[in-house]
Image (spheres, rainbow, N blue to C red):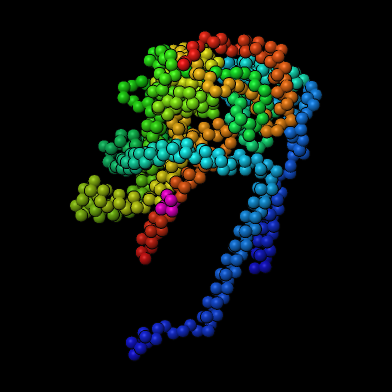
Amino acid sequence: MSASAAAAGPPPPSPLARERAAYRRSRSRRSTLIALASTLVFAGLLVAAVAGSPGWPRVRETFLDPQIAWESLPAVLSGLWLNLRVLVVAEIGVLVLGLLIAVLRTLRGPVFLPVRLLATGCVDLFRGVPLLVALYLIGFGLPALRLQGVPTEAAVLGTLTLVLVYSAYVAEVFRAGIESVHPSQRAAARSLGLTHRQSLRLVVLPQAVRNVLPPLLNDFVALQKDVGLISVLGAVDAIRAAQIESARTFNFTPYVVAALLFVALAAPTGRIADAFARRATRARSGS
Amino acid sequence: MTRARTTTILLAALLAATIAGCAPQPDPAATGAGAAADCAPGALPTLAQGTLTIGTDQPVYPPWYLDDDPTSGRGFESAVAYAVADDLGYPRDRVTWVRVPFNAAIQPGPKTYDLNLTEFSITEERRRAVDFSSPYYDVRQAVVALKTSPLARSTTVAQLKGARLGAQIGTTSLEQLNASVAPTTPAAVYNTNDDGKLALSNGQTDGLVVDLPTAFQIVGSDLPEATIVGQLPAGGTLEQFGAVLDKDSPLTGCVSAAVDRLRERGTLAALEQQWIQADGAAPELR
């Protein structure tokens, strides 16, 4: 009997259920249409307002000149290559230094007070100083000391500054992650006989890092853009290359080219962050 | 439900009205743009009726402007600006100054100045975006280096090739550096010549390319431990500074005529003599 019921499959939906389903479908079709119409009307109004403005031909010429865009592309791209290299090196440095500072800040015990104070001081200092100011102070101030072995290369000094400033942010993200792990986890690890370091490495940090992956990726995107600021030290990155082209022609199209390239760089990171966030939610909800 | 829908429609209508409302009307004054004005003394179609508004960057540097004060009439461009204004029928008390950063000076929207004197080099490419007056100064580019640097003893352009050279963004110094020296190490590009000077004295760059008057200013007072290595070859075309005006400004013709008259009368040469000591003391690099 149970076998025949399984073969017949679920009973057909009742007329009432079918009616409900049809109603839902029609409502959803209707809202799709309304959304579409509303978007079209809105876009139309926007285009009409912008393109109908008296200055539009000149704005189009100044910001959206295809020929200048094409001509400036090689220079901007070669600048972007510098951005990418600095980004990779800086991001690795930021993760290492940020994690180190976070761990130092979470050390307990009176012996570690000086270390904790130092780590807290670092965070307060570098999170507080505006990046541009930090770049000037480190980028021009460090070589001014004329010490042996201090780099004078703009890209190196810029990367160093980025690492210091961003580590301060990322350390706080890591610390939030570490503190989000319930104390019982640490207690359980210790009761299993793990040392403080082992429990941190094997139990606390893996959970902490997973918890803070989305904000870490967010900081990564922010870093992607701020890498351009090292140009104040003389390095020619994508933005500076665009600026040079723009000054040559008195046309702002190269900036638009650089902006689009940066968006193309940041968009994948954003999607990865979304995917991580979804996975984390699924893992927490236990489905 | 009906109430909610009414509200929505009202909101949409409001939004549409707002968008329509902020579409600007064409400026009635701008319709006459491009038409040649008759240059009636003191009665030009300026931004502010009765006064001439002159723009320049902030900060500005000697010998173009002294003490970052364009209103003093001291410094070459300040003096030229007042001479041009006077010739157009705007005596000193009818001239106002505005500070305009580089990007704001060349943006496509309405300008905040009638004319702008900030060492703008005249090029055909730039003419697509702005108007230039007749040139008021012919420029040469020079390389500055520390006296202790081996670069300081260079006599040819070829000897500069391997050096780390810098220049300020948005200047023809940078263009000429790339065009006539073509250094093997990419040029460092600074926001201002001040940053460039700092990098030079730090040893982060071996040499800085600036226009000759600025070079004299640097070695004369800003950075006494530096020296002028020499002038870069002039290249194909002569580089000249001109006042920038809004594209198709009705004033362009009048300002150009005024600059031309000042040149003929010898006023420009006299001002050059007074404010710029570029007496050709810097050697030519071959």
User: What residue is rendered at 68% in x and 63% in y?
Assistant: B6
Regarding residue A53, the answer to whether it shows in the image is: yes
**B124, B282: nearer the viewer:** B124
Residue B33: x, y in percent? 74, 34
Residue at x 19%, y 52% (from the top left corner):
A193
**Which stretch did the figure color magenta?**
A268-273
* Residue B98 rendering spot, x and y as whole percentages: 66, 27
Looking at the image, residue B120 lies above or below residue B23: above
Q: Quadrant of residue B126?
A: top right
Position of B239 compared to B11: left or right? left
In this rendering, does residue A137 appear at all? Answer: no
Q: Magenta: predominant secondary structure element?
A: helix
Q: Is residue A286 highlighted in magenta?
A: no
Q: Is-magenta flag for residue A270? A: yes
Relative side of A185 to A17, left or right: left
- Quadrant showing the N terminus of chain B: bottom right
Residue shown at 31%/43% (left/top)? A103
* Residue A201 in the image, given as x and y percentages of width and height: 26, 48
Between B31 and B114, which is closer to the camera in this rendering?
B31
**Farthest residue toward the front?**
B236
Vertical placement of residue A221 versus B272, above or below: below
Return the residue found at the far left: A193
Numbered marks: total: 0
Drawn side of residue A63 relative to residue A221, left or right: right
Horizontal placement of A64 versus A9: left or right?
A: right
Q: Residue at x 62, y 59 (%)?
A: A40
Expressed as whole percent of the image width and height from the top left, the position of residue B198 reads 45, 21
Q: Nearer the viewer, residue A90 or A119?
A: A90
